[in-house]
Image: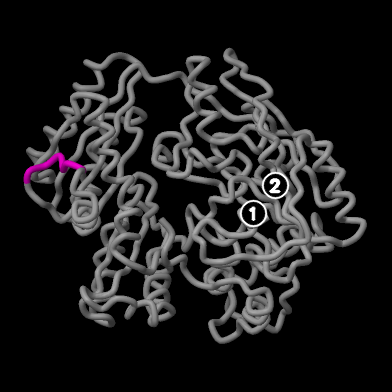
Amino acid sequence: MAPFLTDWCKSFTGSAKAVIRPSSTEEVASIVRLCAKHYVPIVPQGGNTGLVIGSVPDSCGNAIVLSLSRLNRIRDIDVANLTMTVESGCILDNVRDAAAGSGLLFPLSIASSGSCTIGGNLSSNAGGNAGLRYGNARELCLGLEVVNPQGEIWNGLSKLRKDNTGYDLRDLFIGAEGTLGIITAAVLKLFPQPKAKMTAFAGLRSPADAQRLLSIARRHCDAALTEFELMSGHSLQLVAKHFPQLSMPLSSEHRQYALLEFSDAESEEHVMSLLERVIGDAIKEDIVQDAAVASSIAQANAMANLRGHIFSAQAMEGRNIKHDVAVPTSRVADFIESTDALLQKNFPGCRTVAFGHLGDGSLHYNVFPPEGAFGKSLTLQDEINRIVYDSVDLFEGSISPEYGIGSLMRSELLVHKSAFELEMMRKIKHVLDPHQLMNPGRVFMSSITAKNKTMAGGISRNNRSDEDSDCKERGDAGGSCIEHA
């Protein structure tokens, strides 16, 4: 049972009555009916690659883990309709390979693609590098099959792109982290494979210049711009330090870097002309200091590997405080500059590693202690989180655009969502899962009482008693994941 009870970060291990591994939707429904009859909580689990302690049981030992890993069949690929119907336990890479085998593209791409499952991707509304062009998991799904908390099967496997016949039930379950029902299958959108791809790597002075480069790329390329990744100079210094075998595309160091990918339905010559126009204009306007264009797939992969190794380089450098945040794309540069300054003022010498999907405004914003002060910042984690998350609020952002809430971010949700929003969510939860059996303790505690609400909106930072005591009782961690890779 051990692999099913420990989270991806290896920071928490729970307890469960059993791990159940059904192989069909009907078996899932039968298990849920049995659990509902005896009031046994259920923790749905896909690839268990989440980073917010949302797919493992708490320490009470009252729940079962319901693993969807054996629901791994691709039921249908409709080439003419550009859709495929897959079960929720399908590994993401296998889905991508199956689409490619039919000459099509399923564009969702995240670091854990060899382990994560489609059900988990949808339950967390996963993002990824190609979100700029194709959107998150929600935008890539047309229909769902779901087992509700009473063990009934909803067949919503629609292949339609237009259907205005009532409420969109599908969107209730996507991003709900298994708290409203269990996704057992999905209809996914497919796309034609691009005829050509080009990758460029640019050195810049500042995040503001990266925003200007993004505007130029959008102006010239529109849908051909598939990825736009921002990386701070410090993040690549860590990669160079811990992975010296990886070559840097540019001969000199820069304060910021951008990784751009262009995909085109016409030809390699056409996409190259678009890329040259973007880089040429950016150099003329003194936005880009230096740039390199990949001349082969190997070079393109080498550029992407630099971005992909940042997580590992951070882990090798030492423990740090991680934040998955988002602000409007137009405000990313101001957010970085402002938050960096606030942290330096309060914690002189701390080192920030900022990188992420500038195209959709989501950012990994991580904080290291000063050189030689290992572990010092970790004792100040709450204070550092407060500065970062208050800054996110100031810039009208989100405290979790990609990872979700789980139990790790639950107390922060109470601060950053209004009382009205929380109450609407609790009402939905109560209607669909009145006995609180589906992934209990994740996202929020529906039993929290009105005394915890402030009159102005949200939960005050001094009124977390119900949630915090529940966290301690369950043994769940709180705050940011500090050492996931």
Query: Overall secondary structure of the magenta stretch?
Result: loop
Please say whether residue 249 is one of the residues in the magenta stretch: yes
Q: Badge 2 local density, few (<14 within 10 Å), some, or many (20+)?
A: many
| Secondary element at tag 2 | strand
Is 437 placed above or below 221 here? below
Q: Mark 2 — residue?
A: 67
Which comes before the other along the chain, label 2 or label 1? 1
Residue at x 30%, y 52% (from the top left corner): 310
Give the percent coordinates (x, y) of residue 256.
19, 53
Give the percent coordinates (x, y) of residue 128.
43, 43
Q: Which numbered marker is on residue 4?
A: 1
Give the percent coordinates (x, y) of residue 235.
25, 56
Q: Which is nearer the eye, 478 or 339?
A: 478
Which residue is at the far right? 37
Q: In this view of the protein, can residue 85 be seen by the observer?
A: yes
Q: Is residue 21 left or right of residue 7?
A: right
